[in-house]
Amino acid sequence: MAIFKQLFEDGGTSTMTYIIADADTREAVIIDPVLEQVDRDLKVIEELGLELKYIVETHVHADHVTGGSGLKKATGAEFVAGIGTGVSCSDLMLADGDTLTFGNEVLHAIATPGHTNGCMSYRWRDRLFTGDTILIEAAGRTDFQEGDAGALYDSIRKLMAYPDEYLVYPAHDYNDRRVSSVGQEKLRNPYVRAESREAFIRMMDELDLPRPKRIDVAVPANERCGEVA
Amino acid sequence: MAIFKQLFEDGGTSTMTYIIADADTREAVIIDPVLEQVDRDLKVIEELGLELKYIVETHVHADHVTGGSGLKKATGAEFVAGIGTGVSCSDLMLADGDTLTFGNEVLHAIATPGHTNGCMSYRWRDRLFTGDTILIEAAGRTDFQEGDAGALYDSIRKLMAYPDEYLVYPAHDYNDRRVSSVGQEKLRNPYVRAESREAFIRMMDELDLPRPKRIDVAVPANERCGEVA
């Protein structure tokens, strides 16, 4: 048996944070915590009687500062990021195919560069945590940090190779959606449905988006694992 | 470990059929099979090496004939329906709170009358199979069979009392969606968001929908567990 919690940050970043635990051993992981929500997350962890083992980041976020530093201080959990992030404060750097074990449960790392170099998606059972690689009916931007539309196209295809029933849990949604599936994204996501790698790159190039408001604060702070200077 | 398959009937009824199995014992249930897809379903069952134990109906459908009779003949599985359906050909008639066990997995029956008297939703782990009680951003009709908008309102509230993370798998979707969650429906479904029981009843009364095309064939056939006369 397992415990699965989805938490939402509605203070401006619409970030979804996930807590997964083994119900027997109570060992837990948290994916993409948010600085302003550390107290909320600690409360959930305490109420459920969990022992936080890993704080897992899908990438170096540009829109919010991770709650990783605060959670680590409070719980002693290890900070985990993809090796491509180059985040040297991380306790563990995962490569594609690496796994994290918590109790009898396993989180599988899937390298999905494109939105940033170090973007990592994760799979637990039949649930995919896609970070900013695939959003519901959308995809991560490729116009800042190390954005690379061609790499993102390849990463999206890698995730869409899982069975149609596999659930898609992204890092954000701005329209009150909370979950999708591989099959649903194949049918409804215009970025997944791009005709070719070239067409996808063109779609991304033609987006004309404002610079993220918090990028100048968030990226350096996240490169310090959320330690605010 | 468990196996979960979601199948879609795109021949006009947009019906979602679900197969759930215990990966160790291979015992399986199927929810809402469709007559025209019996061969597809048998192929999936055979390919996965499953032993079908129960054929489970969420209700007496008005839009399609169940594949239950054909699946029962081919596999020997038992036909299961809610006690409120009054379907006397059913091997098992479930009441609210009854359970079906397949291997180490359990399907829980949740009585959700309203769309029809006998509507039953089911819960497996943190997944709700809501039949026509809750559809994604919609609800079942209450203008035929034993439709009762007040009862449907109460049933929707009963399902929405589960945690926000619980997944919603309806019997149909006409817009390429495949899954939602309790939290998502609370935010996006206008029927879930009705201000009061009275407002909900008024919403349902004001719908002016055509009579379902197949109702005169489907309902009598489904009352015979899918045995075509």
Image (cartoon, coloured by chain):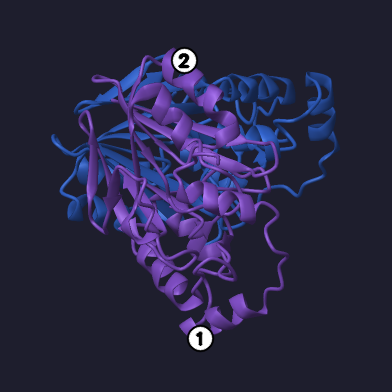
Chain colours: A blue, B purple
Residue B207 appears at what percent x and percent y?
A: 67, 74
- Could you say whether the residue bearing mark 2 is in a helix, strand or loop? loop
Residue A228 appears at what percent x and percent y?
A: 42, 47
Q: Check disc 1 and give the amino acid type.
A: Glu
Res A69 label: none
Question: Can residue B42 be seen by looking at this rendering?
Answer: yes
Q: Which quarter of the figure has residue B84?
A: bottom left
Q: Which quarter of the figure has residue A122?
A: top left
Residue drawn at (85%, 29%) of the image:
A202
Dot 1: chain letter: B
- Foreground of the two, B217 or A81: B217
Q: In the image, is residue A69 above or below residue B113?
A: above
Q: In the image, is residue A106 above or below residue A173?
A: above
The residue indicated by pointer 2 is A96
In this picture, residue B169 sits left or right of residue B24: right
Res B198 label: 1
Dot 2: chain letter: A
Question: Can residue A133 be seen by looking at this rendering?
Answer: no
- Foreground of the two, B5 or A37: B5
Residue B140 appears at what percent x and percent y?
A: 55, 62
